[in-house]
Amino acid sequence: MQPHVTPIDFASLDLSPALLKAIQQQGYSSPTPIQSQAIPIILSGHDLRAKAQTGSGKTAAFGLPLLQKILHNREQPKLATTGNQIGTLILAPTRELAIQIAEALTGYASAIMPKVKIQSVHGGISINPQMLALRGGADILVATPGRLLDLAQQNAIKFTDLQCLVLDEADRLLQLGFSEELNEILKLLPKRRQNLLFSATFPDELDQLIAKLLISPVQIDCLAPEEMLIEQRVITVTQERKNALLAHLINEGNLQQVLVFANAKNTCNRLVLKLGKADIYAMALHGDKTQAARNLALKKFKQGECRVLIATDLAARGIDIEQLEAVINFDLPRSPNDYIHRIGRTGRAGQSGLAISLLCEEDEAHFRVIEKRMKKRLEREHFEN
Ligand code: AMP
């Protein structure tokens, strides 16, 4: 994959041989823009405010330097993690993203010996195994806010030794009504620590959090939607013809891995049936599905067994599928920020992608707001099939 800006190689980023080996095993040939910018800043100990979205390579942008710091700290016995202490806390808005970050970090840490303990905790499953897993602490804990607070209340984790806090998808952490939980969590953490904040957008609500959280942060701005390699199409259609258009786009375009966004859980379920009738194997991913069903849908989609995943914004948050071919907005997202998040699922890490929005007459005004935010006017195609 090709980075968008001045490429430098991983070897010049002051990372240990074990990390360079893992990077090579992952098949990364050069750092993405967010990686080449963020890694030196994080290693230098500064607070960071980074504008970057899922797909930009941001997990490695914070994961690699965090692991490098853990290696460095190991050489200083006083800083070793003891008891049920957490060294680094990464907060993520959804279970899927928390699991995904932990998996990615485990990959990046695979050549480090002795092993780095990376644990993820999230709601939706029993708390007891997580409490057990946290005995003896963790070098890195990736958590959703609610479950983290539950664990802290039960004394299953201690933060006295915490050195770094990462907020991933910070705009989402706030949007989901997490700000009270975040405040509670911040109260538990030691004041002296490094803070890294990653967000695809910086709405006004973030200002307060940034002021409270970050001390003289270095700022990186990596997301420029108009620079992303994404072909955006907009097709006008009547409500009645939307299902037919969706099936048509998938079949005619011979799309093999499509993420379709719908705004309601029952729309997701209904579309699975409708596409099934057009011989398109689709699965739904939304909050009413059990964790097992969500994992299964993701697995089948990632393996290419299921061609279409139909998801709500919340459930699709942070899903990382390499080279996701296309994103279709069956329903328009509520906000321009969500539009950027959605289309960022495709064209990932430098690959080109396709984002198609279905537009009914009543959506026109709303879509103009999105275009205004994108500073881009998209040509309307018409579906008259
Ligand atoms: P992320 O933004 O962290 O969700 O990463 C998006 C995708 O890019 C993941 O599949 C990563 O494995 C991949 N990726 C991250 N860094 C690189 C890199 N330097 N070169 C190629 N792919 C990368």
Image (tube, rainbow, N blue to C red):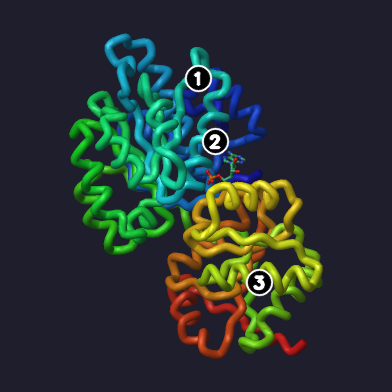
Residue appearing at x 58%, y 78% in the figure = 378
Image location (x, y in percent) of residue 346: 62, 58
Disc assigned to residue 16: 1
Labels 2 and 1: the sequence-earlier one:
1
For marks 3 and 2, give the CA distance: 31 Å
For marks 3 and 1, give the CA distance: 48 Å
| Vertical placement of residue 49 versus 274, above or below | above
> Ligand 1 within 8 A of label 1's CB?
no
Q: Nearer the viewer, mark 3 or mark 1?
A: 3
Labels 3 and 1: the sequence-earlier one:
1
73 lies left or right of 341 = left
Question: Do we see residue 273 in this rendering?
Answer: yes
Which quadrant, please, contains the N terminus? top right
Labels 3 and 2: the sequence-earlier one:
2
Q: Quadrant of residue 177?
A: bottom left
Q: Which residue is mark 2?
A: 104
Question: What's under tag 2, amino acid-wise?
Answer: Ala
> Ligand 1 within 8 A of label 2's CB?
yes
Q: Quadrant of residue 268?
A: bottom right
Which image quadrant shows ligand 1? top right
Q: Which residue is mark 3?
A: 271
Image location (x, y in percent) of residue 29: 64, 34
| Vertical placement of residue 86 versus 315, above or below | above
Image location (x, y in percent) of residue 245: 71, 79
How packed mark 1 is, by other alpha carbons closer than 10 Å (few <14, some 14-19, many 20 or more), is some
Residue 293 or residue 10, whichever sits in front: 293
Local secondary structure at mark 1: loop
Q: Nearer the viewer, mark 3 or mark 2?
A: 3
